[in-house]
Image: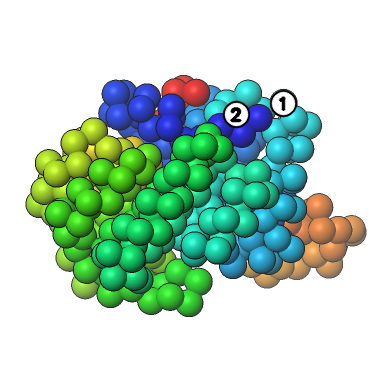
Amino acid sequence: MLVSVKEMMQKAREGKYAVPQININNLEWTKSVLATAQELQSPVILGVSEGAGKYMTGFKTVAAMVKAMIEEMNITVPVALHLDHGTYEGCKKCIEAGFSSIMFDGSKYPIEENVEKTRELVNICAEKGLSLEAEVGSIGGEEDGVVGMGEFADPEECKKIADLGVDILAAGIGNIHGKYPENWPGLNFDVLANVKAKVGDMPLVLHGGTGIPADMIQKAISLGVCKINVNTECQLSFAAATRKYIEEGKDLQGKGYDPRKLLAPGAEAIKETVKEKMELFGSVGKA
Ligand SMILES: [Zn+2]
């Protein structure tokens, strides 16, 4: 059964750890993430971007697949199925498809419009028992073709959105999607502390978890971050393992072309990456 992230976030805040959101792209991805969460007894949030949802033929397919896998794999740890950076229309589709959590990314709208649309979604989610993540201030890098400038979130705007009754809040603090550039100045903990001071107990989300140094991750958690999103890092480890298999000519040996063999090293690499993240975020054994 899928759960919202509400209870996960409350426990994470009290226990001073973060729950990983691992974005999924296909069946192998989902299977690897669920197996690792179960093995390590960690709660997990499966993130689905609108692009990934489209790739998997639609949100209904994703919801049906994840629900069936939880049952067939005997997964007992808390699992949330969460729309990542949803448009207003995408949010409505995921609510209908049976997701347990959504993120409305209204950062491209003027603050008044972001507030208006977020308020509407707060009401729908409350009624249906879903959790809702909102974003203030765009997050740098590229996400599904939308390039953010990586500005810092305005703590006053964060409060305005938090007060609407969202469950989790993503605030830009210098984090970037994708690989971090060489000259990246790091997370801005002053901004994080200022946001935290305004929003109180609201669990905060750190997007762009790939490549942030471990000490910065831990400091962010100590300052109120309860959910960290990881996407690119799994893609990189999957690609590297698959490349190695092909470059070693293993697809040409015996039945090495069998997709179950061809994709196995990549699937194992995802497990390894997810394990590292769960250990770093402190979520192991917290299911
Ligand atoms: Zn993001």
How many labels were placed on the picture?
2
Residue at horizontal 27 percent and vertical 38 percent from the top: 202
Q: CA distance from mark 2 to mark 1?
A: 9 Å
Q: Which residue is mark 2?
A: 38
**Badge 2: few (under 14), some or many (20 or more) residues near its Cα, within 10 Å?**
many
Residue at horizontal 36 percent and vertical 43 percent from the top: 166
The answer to which of 63 and 229 lies nearer the viewer is 63
Residue 214 x, y percent position in the rendering: 29, 46
**Where, by quadrant of the figure, is residue 163 drawn?**
top left
Q: Amino acid at mark 2?
A: Gln
Q: Amino acid at mark 1?
A: Asn
Q: Which residue is mark 1?
A: 74
Ligand 1 neighbours mark 2 (CB distance < 8 Å): no
Instruction: From the viewer's perspective, tell me whether residue 259 is left or right of residue 119.
Output: right
**Badge 1: few (under 14), some or many (20 or more) residues near its Cα, within 10 Å?**
few
The answer to which of 208 and 114 lies nearer the viewer is 114
Residue at horizontal 67 percent and vertical 55 percent from the top: 59
Residue at horizontal 35 percent and vertical 71 percent from the top: 108
| 186 to 133, vertically: above or below | below
Instruction: From the viewer's perspective, tell me whether residue 19 is left or right of residue 194.
Output: right
Mark found first going from the N terminus, 2 or 1: 2
Is disc 2 in contact with disc 1, using a CB cutoff of under 8 Å?
yes
**Does any portion of residue 94 appear in the rendered image?**
yes
Residue 224 x, y percent position in the rendering: 24, 38
| 249 to 238, vertically: above or below | below
Q: Residue furthest right?
A: 254
Instruction: From the viewer's perspective, tell me whether residue 176 is left or right of residue 258.
Output: left
**Does any portion of residue 206 appear in the rendered image?**
no
Residue 261 x, y percent position in the rendering: 79, 53
